[in-house]
Each structure stands twice: as structure tokens, then as C-alpha cells.
């Protein structure tokens, strides 16, 4: 588990550095982040359902039920993001190339490596919520209507229990499962950094080199 915990810590630190480069005072930057987050969060329940469906019968029943239990907790979170964009007075942006690839790569990873690939994806994002979310929430709520920050506020609170529960579950994994989990955390991290890079390239092109 040490390598998994270290990967979560390092990836959160690297992502935090990149996140904090963004000009959150600019409503267009925050709206872009909300939009791109919406475009992968709208797939959350579908990805969880896919993870549950590819869990091997009998062998991975525990994972199958873990994802099914988690699924109702993620319903309609995409609507919170739409709400925040509207309260910000901005329009929802289309999905970027990096965001579309982020979702497609997760589907491919599950098809190739099974449901444990989704555990890594989920752990990375929910750990990011609790590691980076509070500071980001403080920044955007300082600059913008707090009613446009509901998604961040909700996930910095709720995902603490989600991460704790997932890590407890992962204690019982075998080495092959842990390797798949670790690889998924690392690939999800790379994909998310590309999403942030495209946001920076679109709204803060002078900072691209600094943020890479």
C-alpha cells in the first residue's frame, strides 16, 4: 500500500501546483474548469456501472458490490456543475480534447485491465478533492458568488469518507490488483494534468511553459 499512498500524495502535490497557477479570479477560467469537470463527471455513474459490470463473477464480487454501493452517491452531481456555471453568469464550454480523451482512456483501461482500473481513477479524483479542493474552494469563493461554488464545497466534505473507505477496501487487494490500481492512479494523473494544461492554454497562454 505504501506505493499507492505515495502515488496519491505525489500526484496531489503536482496537481495542486498546476491548479494554483490558474487565474481563479477570472470568471472565464473558473467557468472553463467547471465545464471540463462537468464533461467527465457526467460519465461518473456510467463508469461506475461499467466497473461493476466488468468485475469478474465470484472472483471480484466484493468490487462489484463496492461500485454498486458507491453509484447512488454520485447521481446527478453533473447537475451541480451546471448550476454553478449558471450562478457564475457564464456559459458551459464544450468538452476539450483532453477531457474527451480522459473519459475514453478510462473506458479503455477498464476493458483491458478490469474493474480495478476504475478504483484507481476514482481514488485519484476523490483524493484530489480533499487534498486540493479546500484551498481551491477558498480561492474561488473569495472571488465569485459562493452559490457558484457548490460542487467544490460538497466534494471537499463528502470525498473524505469516500477516500477513507476506498483505502480500507484496498488493504485486502492482492499484488496484481494493487499494480493495476497504481497504474490507473498514475495514468489518471497524467490525463487530468492535460485537462488543466488545455485550460491554461486557452485562458492563460503565457503560463503554459510554467505549468507544464
Image (cartoon, rainbow, N blue to C red):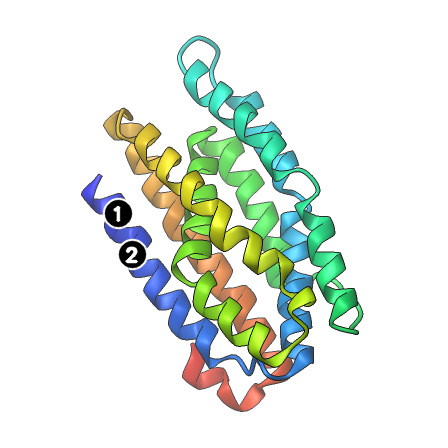
Identify which residue, 110 or 141, lies in the foreground.
141
Q: Residue at x 29, y 37 (%)?
A: 179
Q: Residue at x 71, y 42 (%)?
A: 76
Where residue 153 sits: x, y (%)? 55, 58
Q: Are marks 2 and 1 in contact (CB under 8 Å)?
A: yes
Q: Which mark is residue 9?
A: 2
Kindly indicate the quadrant of the structure image that contains residue 87: bottom right
Residue farthest to the bottom, as pictured: 206
Identify which residue, 55 or 63, lies in the foreground.
63
Q: Residue at x 31, y 32 (%)?
A: 168
Where residue 207 sits: x, y (%)? 49, 87
Q: CA distance from mark 2 to mark 1?
A: 6 Å
Where residue 72 sits: x, y (%)? 62, 31
Q: Which mark is residue 5?
A: 1
Q: Which mark is residue 86?
A: none
Tell me if residue 101 comes above or below residue 197 in the rendering: above
Mark yes or no: residue 96 visible: no
- How packed is label 2: few (under 14 Cα within 10 Å), some, or many (20 or more)? some
Residue farthest to the left, as pictured: 2
Amino acid at each position: 500500500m505504501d506505493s499507492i499512498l505515495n502515488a496519491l500524495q505525489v500526484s496531489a502535490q503536482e496537481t495542486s501546483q498546476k491548479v494554483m497557477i490558474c487565474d481563479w479570479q477570472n470568471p472565464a477560467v473558473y467557468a472553463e474548469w467547471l465545464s471540463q469537470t462537468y464533461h467527465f463527471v457526467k460519465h461518473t455513474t456510467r463508469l461506475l456501472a461499467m466497473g461493476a459490470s466488468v468485475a469478474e463473477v465470484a472472483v471480484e464480487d466484493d468490487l462489484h458490490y463496492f461500485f454498486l454501493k458507491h453509484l447512488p452517491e454520485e447521481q446527478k452531481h453533473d447537475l451541480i456543475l451546471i448550476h454553478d456555471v449558471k450562478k457564475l453568469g457564464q456559459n458551459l464550454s464544450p468538452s476539450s480534447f483532453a477531457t474527451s480523451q480522459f473519459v475514453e482512456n478510462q473506458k479503455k483501461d477498464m476493458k483491458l485491465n478490469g474493474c480495478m482500473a476504475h478504483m484507481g481513477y476514482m481514488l485519484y479524483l476523490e483524493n484530489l478533492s480533499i487534498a486540493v479542493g479546500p484551498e481551491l474552494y477558498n480561492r474561488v469563493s473569495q472571488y465569485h458568488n459562493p452559490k457558484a461554488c457548490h460542487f467544490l464545497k460538497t466534494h471537499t466534505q463528502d470525498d473524505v469518507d469516500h477516500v477513507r473507505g476506498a483505502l480500507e477496501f484496498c488493504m485486502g487487494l492482492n499484488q496484481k490488483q494493487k499494480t493495476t490500481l497504481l497504474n490507473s492512479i498514475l495514468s489518471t494523473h497524467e490525463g487530468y494534468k492535460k485537462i488543466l494544461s488545455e485550460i491554461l492554454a486557452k485562458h492563460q497562454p503565457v503560463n503554459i511553459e510554467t505549468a507544464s
